Image: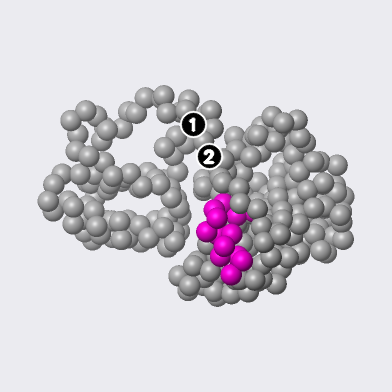
Amino acid sequence: MPDIAIFLTYLEGGGVERVLVNLIRGFVQQGLSIDLVLVKAKGPFLSLIPPEVRIIDLGVNRLVLSIPGLVNYLRENKPKALLSAMQDINLVALWARRLAGVSTRIVVSVHNTISQESQNSTQLKRRIAPYLARWFYPWADAVITVSQGSAEDFQRLGLSSEYLKVIYNPVVTAELFQKALEPLEHPWFKSGSPPVILAVGRLEAQKDFPTLIKAFAEVRQHRPAKLMILGEGQHRPALEALVQELDLELDVALPGFVDNP
């Protein structure tokens, strides 16, 4: 029986995934037994998982298809607690625990302001996310938000404060300081080079990188500068097309996921 099971889709190079990797390492250092349950065992952060962690690959390509496998995992292994992160994953975790009929305590974590995300999205599942949270999040033993503002947003949705815990993201680690000492070899950062604007995030609509690129084009008309956007996502083709349209190919770089930004 593991102390904690952590449920995610996969370990792509996103901020939430990085936070969970840091948590896993901290749990292992505390002597806890950890299972990492993945919808699909893939992604650049897999190599960062400590060898003491057991990785459970449910081996499916869609989150909803993982429900039977997660139910079976919970029934067979009965972890003391299950931790999930992000809206869709949280809902599947809650449904699976209910279907499994186990006593595993479940904690869901939220990394966005859910009502604002709903208002800004054109996707139906995002538009109805506040209603789904209101209906199903009370099934959790606790709901973790990463800011006080997000917690207050949930309270306005009608979720009782007794479920809510504010815990900030564990992003500053000893490894971070070690990586900061590594040499920076990209030619844009050599002494005497033009200033570089650095952005980091998933290449998705939520990050609104088109506005940044258009603003950079305005800056570029007045002075030399470079723009580097680190991260990967579905909007890469659209962003690359915008860079080309604005004739910024020599001044904008999208190198993708970078292990040490």
Q: Residue furthest front?
A: 161
Is 49 on the left-hand or right-hand side of 13? right
> Which secondary structure dominates the residues rendered in magenta?
helix
How many angstroms separate mark 2 from mark 1 (CA)?
Answer: 8 Å
Secondary structure under badge 2? Answer: loop
Q: Is residue 201 above or below residue 183?
A: below
Query: Disc 2, disc 1: CB below 8 Å?
Result: yes
Q: Is residue 233 left or right of residue 83?
A: left
The tag earlier along the polypeptide, 2 or 1, is 2
> Is the residue 101 above or below the residue 130 in the image?
above
Residue receiving disc 1? 176
Residue drawn at (51%, 48%) of the image: 14
Q: Is residue 145 magenta?
A: yes
Kind of residue at badge 2: Val
> Helix or strand or loop: what does disc 1 sit on?
helix
**Residue stretch rendered in magenta on the structure:** 144-156
Q: Amino acid at mark 1?
A: Leu
Q: How many marks?
A: 2
Q: Determine which residue is flagged by label 2.
A: 171
Q: Is residue 159 located in the magenta-colored stretch of the structure?
A: no
- Check the picture and name the quadrant holding the C terminus: top left
Q: Quadrant of residue 241?
A: bottom left
**What mark, if any, has residue 140 been given in the picture?**
none
